[in-house]
Amino acid sequence: MKNFHSFFIGFILILFSVCQEKEELFTPELIGTWEKTGFDPTNGYEGVLSYNFKTDGTYTWSISYREPGATENLGYQLIWKGNFRSTENQLTLMPQEIFYPAENFRTPPGAKMEDMVKSQEYNPDSPGSVNIYRINISNDATEFLLYAQPVAGNGPPSDDILFVKVK
C-alpha cells in the first residue's frame, strides 16, 4: 500500500509539472519591426537603424539607408541575426551571424541584401555573446526605448534610442 501511495503522489507531481504554463520567452508587444531614422546630410540618405523581432524568438538588427521619406531600403551597412528573449523591461540579444557589405559596397547606401557577406572573423560583440539591455515599451506598444549601456555584454548601441513600430 505504501508503494501505491508513493506511486500515486509521484504521478500527481509529474502531471502537475507537465500541466504548468510555459514561461514566455518574450514580451508579445515587442514582436514586429521597429525603426529609428535620421537624415544624414553627408550622403543625402536617410539612415535607418532597425530591429525585427519574430515570434520564433529570432531577431534581425540592421543599419541601412534609403531615400528620404521612402520606406524601402536601398542598401545595408551591417546586419546581425540571432536569438532574443525579453521581459517587460529587459531585452537579451544573442547574436549568431553578422553580415557586412561586399568590398565594393562599403559606402552609403551600402549593399543589397544579396550582396551582404557573412563575417568569418571573431568579434567580441558577435556570435556566442549575450547582450542584455534595459528597455521600456510604451503603453500603446508603438514605441520602445533601448537604454544606452547594456546591463551585461558590450554590444551596440551607444546612446539611448527610441524606436517606433512600423510593422
Image: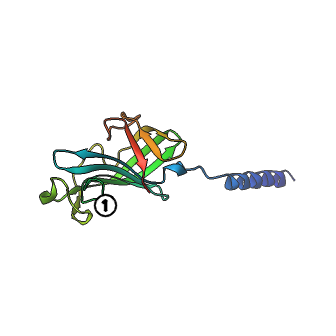
Front residue of 113 and 25: 113
Determine the image quadrant of residue 18.
bottom right
Furthest toward the left, the residue is: 104
Front residue of 93 and 142: 142
Whether residue 162 sits left or right of residue 62 in the image: it is: right
Furthest toward the front, the residue is: 69
Residue 84 % position (x, y)? 44, 50
Whether residue 104 sits left or right of residue 124 in the image: it is: left
* Residue 80 appearing in the image: yes
Residue 167 % position (x, y)? 44, 57
Residue 157 % position (x, y)? 32, 40
Q: Residue at x 73, y 51 (%)?
A: 13
Amino acid type at mark 1: Glu
What residue does disc 1 label?
72
Residue 144 % position (x, y)? 45, 43
Front residue of 24 and 52: 52
Furthest toward the bottom, the residue is: 114
* Residue 26 appearing in the image: no
Whether residue 62 sits left or right of residue 57 in the image: it is: left
Front residue of 3 and 10: 10
